Amino acid sequence: MIQRTKNSTSLKARNDIAFFSLVIPILLLVFGVLLSIKHDGVLYWIGQLLLSFFFLQTFILLHECAHLSFFKTRSVNVVLGHFFGFFSLIPFYSWQQMHNLHHRWTGWRDKDPTTESTVSPSSSRAKNSVVNIAWKLCIPLFYLSYKLSNYWNLFKIKRFINPKKYRKVRTQMLVYLIMYAVLVYFFWEYIVQVFVFAFAISLLWKELVIMTQHSHIEIPISNDNEVKPISYLDQVQYTRSFRVNVFFAKYFLFNFNLHEAHHAHPAVPAYKLTDIHLEASQQPKFFYWLFKAKKMKGVDYIFKTSKHTGEIF
């Protein structure tokens, strides 16, 4: 894989840039809440839309902090990672452990815990019909399944991490659940009015972003053979980026669309990914990808690859 990057020093995390990146999420949260509380009708739904983008950004920032490279200081990444994880409804430590395994095993579809369930579709015609309908109607079934099965499923997580880490994951899940229960008990009406609809809308944004990254790409299967992890640079061929407006990508997606560069250099903070240039990258325009992907059946997009359908975007 041929690449061009700036020197390693210029790619290191900087607290000034990282904290400045939080300005837009804070503004989205503040104005979204104010509009949702003080207004109804059109202004209320504008507030909900703003909050939905805030929830999308907390998910992306959870991802960045889990790599411990968004902020220069490890402790800041951990503390704010929990904050973003709480708003994303994903426990920080659970995400960190499973996502690290994703980076280790990208390129082996059945070894990567986040893609192992996509090797073959269900034999149930009813389930496949539900999958196809959800995909066509933009119901974020795939993202919900991805989140629950990978970051809340203790049975699955236990298979992949050692007992000490598993106990920590389990404890943090319990803490998160207690905090959610307390908030719901005391602030149920406020939560429903301000956050529930916005969070539901954000699930769609998250799914559309997540589904660009590794789905419908020809990825080898180990078939239980002993295999070695694929190097970060060689993982690029099993990853997809997409192109959107540069301003939107930088300030709203925090360069989360540059997924190939991220896999090539997972320790580089998101705001530095534009300094990494990869040859032969897969970067379709987002709406072109969306149009082509939605023309397919959901089971075909998830469980088949471009080798089977000819759709390489």
Image (cartoon, rainbow, N blue to C red):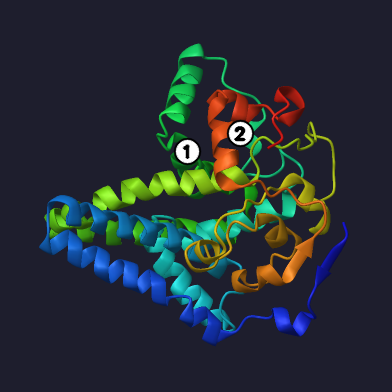
Label for residue 145?
1
Whether residue 184 appears in this view of the structure is yes
Question: Residue at the location (47% across, 42% down)?
Answer: 143
Q: Residue furthest bottom?
A: 16
Where is residue 44? Give x, y as percent.
Answer: 18, 55
Q: Are marks 2 and 1 in contact (CB under 8 Å)?
A: yes
Whether residue 185 appears in this view of the structure is no
Dividing the image into 4 quarters, which one contains the C terminus? top right
Residue nearest the observer in this picture, 299 or 290: 290
Where is residue 6? Give x, y as percent.
Answer: 78, 77
Q: Secondary structure at mark 2?
A: helix
Alpha-carbon distance for marks 2 and 1?
10 Å
Q: Quadrant of residue 172?
A: bottom left
Q: Earlier in the sequence, mark 2 or mark 1?
A: 2
Name the residue beneath numbered marker 2. Answer: 117
With 137 as the anchor, is 97 left or right in this view?
Answer: right
Question: Residue at the location (62% across, 32% down)?
Answer: 118
Amino acid found under the numbered disc labelled 1: Ser
Question: Residue at the location (78% across, 80% down)?
Answer: 8
Where is residue 116? Give x, y as percent.
Answer: 65, 37
